[in-house]
Amino acid sequence: MQTTLTKTQNIYDVKDFNLWYGSNQALKNITLELGEKQVSAIIGPSGCGKSTFIKTLNLMSKLNPSIRMAGELNFRGENLLTSSMDLADLRKTVGMVFQKPNPFPKSIYENVAYGPRIHGIRNKKELDEIVETSLKGAFLWTEVKDRLNKNAMGLSGGQQQRLCIARALATKPDVLLMDEPTSALDPLSTTKIEELITSLRETYSIVIVTHNMQQAARISDETAFFYMGELIEKGSTQHIFSNPDHKRTEDYISGHFG
């Protein structure tokens, strides 16, 4: 597998991708590229296929036996639909953060150390360094460094979400997938997560699903608009929000439906 890409190349190249839940087609002929080390936002009304799509990018959708997929889902030039790549390795490389914070009912330390342990790291000093680095990367270290052995469930919602981001960072991924990461958070916590995403874009390729168009406009480099399982338009965020090519995109952004 190719391991080094320049910033101008794409980390995903999706071609004629289709997905069915049983006989219901949820995604139709999706073709788009997602760039290396940038924030790509996916917007669209509820039920348009945004979350379904992002969950295909690390093959989480394979957990559902009723799902069938066809087309090309190329990650670093390798089609994940025909690849023999180990799913654990893929999910180490492509981290996921969900809509609602989902820390493990363990200590803050053990939440972050969990992934590295799964992948064979046992050395205490090395784990300590990973935990500290990951928590610093998630803008959480100064808030929790004196209570690493406390249960993570005692953190606030915003802190729990940043802990989940730290947990994803601990396996040193190339990509972070974020499915509505701030929809369950208060405005202050949302601002912190947005600042965090902005700081991470230099190191990681980030794909974020959001209902919040202002959020997409603030933090993303590129935006893709999905509607009824189809990709209507994708381009620079500035172009999509100021001068979209399709009327349906303009109608959605201007609040005519949603």
Image (cartoon, rainbow, N blue to C red):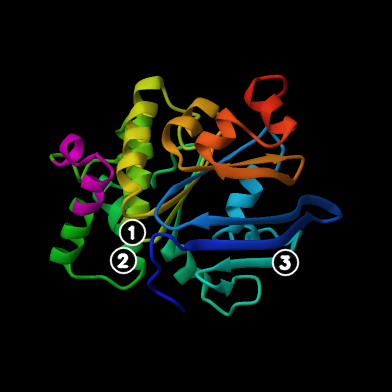
Q: Amino acid at mark 2?
A: Arg
Label at residue 125: none
Residue at 38% across, 30% down: 157
- The residues tagged by marks 1 and 2 sit, at their Cα atoms, a distance apart of 5 Å
Q: Are marks 3 and 2 in contact (CB under 8 Å)?
A: no
Residue drawn at x 13%, y 64% is: 125
Give percent across and percent down for residue 71. 72, 66
The residue identified by callout 1 is 114
Residue type for callout 3: Gly
Which x, y percent locates residue 198? 34, 40
**Magenta region, main secondary structure:** helix
Which residue position holds label 3? Answer: 71
Determine the CA span between mark 3 and mark 1.
Answer: 34 Å
Q: Could you say whether the residue bearing mark 3 is in a helix, strand or loop?
A: strand
Marks 3 and 2, Cα distance to the nearest angstrom? 35 Å
Which of the marked residues, 3 or 1, is nearer the chain's N terminus?
Answer: 3
Residue where numbered disc 2 is placed: 117
Q: Which quarter of the picture shows residue 45?
A: top right
Foreground label between 3 and 2: 3
Quadrant hosting residue 13: bottom right
In the displayed structure, 91 sits above or below 238; it is below
Is residue 94 a member of the stretch shown in magenta? no
Q: In the rendered structure, which segment of residues is drawn in magenta?
A: 133-145
- Tell me the SS state at disc 2: helix
Image height check: is 83 above or below 196?
below
Residue at (67, 67) in percent of width and height: 72
**Type of amino acid at the residue the image marks with label 1:** Tyr
The answer, for residue 176, to whether it is visible in the render is yes
Q: Nearer the viewer, residue 147 or 57?
A: 57
